[in-house]
Image (spheres, rainbow, N blue to C red):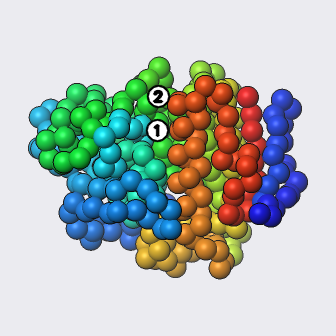
């Protein structure tokens, strides 16, 4: 498979580069936040996704009143399996404001590979409140660690009693959902086994809100890190000089990448855009606002599949493997054009 090669301005000393293939925010905030109420909170069951075989997947909306002591509602995707599986705590875009349901196709593919995905609906998850969002979510997870496995096992046949392996917890955030990820990580460094950031943005593109990683700040960030970015996110959606890109330089992928000192990877999808992980209908609506530059003719299903497989491999090779290798990215399996930086 041909992989696109390109020269990167990101290569740094001590790192190995692998070449391979406000007001303006209101439209997308309103449309995507509104989708929270348009998607029916039902439980679904899926056999597998795409052409790849996988585990059966179930999705369920759980109200906080269903579990004693729980302070937040949540959406969970989990595989039907008799084996204990890793857990991803997922913070969506707009600091967690966007419903995780609009990422359904992407999440289901990850789950079919043996990963539990939980998205918490914090009462504080709106721009500028990432610390409160993280704290509220951390308190919810403390309850879930004790009570979610028994709750699911009682309701669903054919799953392991210890389905969610909390000793293998990864934090994942898309866009400014990266902010509560970092704030949550600061509360739970020892127990967090990995960080996945998807087109991360530290605040808003205009740089008006508080940053979670400040310049020259000492951070003891040693967890394995995977940053998955898109090239078009670096370009403005509008042809106006005053309008910034969704992922401005200094606030996005490399900003987070450079803050971590452990094993880390930055994978940039050269033909894709910021909202391409969303389900097609919602991505179409978001692209129509032109808040972010849309991709042009790229197959969105490929980038969803690529990220799902890459994240599953990241988890397998950072928690479940002794050699700590990232085989998925070293075997030229990419179905899309990417640019990769690896740091140790």
Left or right for 74, reference 129: left
Residue 192, label in figure? 2
Residue found at x 27% / y 38%: 160
Left or right for 31, reference 295: left
Callout 1: helix, strand or loop? strand
Residue 250 percent coordinates (x, y) = 69, 45
Indicate whether 62 appears above or below 137: below
Left or right for 114, reference 219: left
Callout 2: helix, strand or loop? strand
Q: Quadrant of the C terminus?
A: top right
Residue in the foreground of this view, choosing between 277 and 293: 277
Residue found at x 68% / y 63%: 335
Residue 207 percent coordinates (x, y) = 59, 49
The residue singled out by tag 1 in the image is: 171
Q: Quadrant of the N terminus?
A: bottom right
Residue found at x 27% / y 61%: 45
């Amino acid at each position: 498979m041909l992989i696109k090669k390109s020269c990167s301005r990101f290569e740094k000393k001590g790192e190995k580069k692998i070449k391979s293939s406000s007001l303006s925010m209101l439209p997308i905030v309103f449309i995507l936040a509104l989708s929270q109420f348009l998607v029916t909170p039902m439980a679904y069951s899926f056999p597998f996704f795409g052409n790849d075989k996988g585990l059966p997947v179930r999705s369920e909306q759980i109200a906080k009143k269903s579990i004693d002591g729980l302070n937040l509602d949540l959406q969970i995707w989990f595989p039907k399996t008799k084996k204990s599986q890793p857990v991803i705590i997922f913070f969506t875009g707009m600091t967690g404001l966007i419903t995780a349901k609009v990422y359904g196709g992407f999440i289901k593919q990850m789950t079919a590979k043996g990963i539990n995905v939980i998205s918490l609906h914090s009462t504080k998850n709106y721009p500028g409140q990432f610390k409160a969002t993280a704290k509220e979510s951390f308190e919810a997870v403390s309850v879930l660690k004790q009570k979610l496995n028994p709750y699911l096992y009682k309701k669903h046949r054919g799953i392991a009693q210890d389905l969610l392996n909390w000793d293998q917890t990864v934090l994942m955030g898309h866009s400014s959902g990266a902010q509560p990820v970092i704030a949550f990580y600061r509360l739970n460094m020892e127990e967090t086994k990995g960080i996945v950031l998807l087109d991360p943005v530290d605040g808003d593109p205009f740089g008006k809100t508080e940053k979670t990683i400040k310049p020259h700040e000492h951070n003891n960030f040693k967890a394995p890190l995977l940053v998955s970015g898109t090239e078009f996110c670096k370009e403005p959606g509008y042809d106006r000089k005053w309008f910034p890109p969704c992922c401005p330089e200094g606030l996005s992928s490399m900003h987070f990448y450079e803050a971590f000192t452990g094993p880390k990877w930055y994978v940039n999808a050269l033909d894709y855009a910021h909202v391409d992980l969303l389900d097609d209908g919602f991505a179409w609506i978001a692209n129509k606002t032109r808040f972010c530059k849309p991709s042009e003719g790229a197959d969105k299903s490929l980038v969803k599949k690529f990220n799902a497989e890459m994240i599953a491999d990241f988890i397998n090779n950072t928690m479940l493997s002794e050699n700590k290798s990232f085989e998925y990215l070293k075997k030229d399996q990419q179905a899309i054009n990417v640019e990769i930086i690896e740091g140790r």
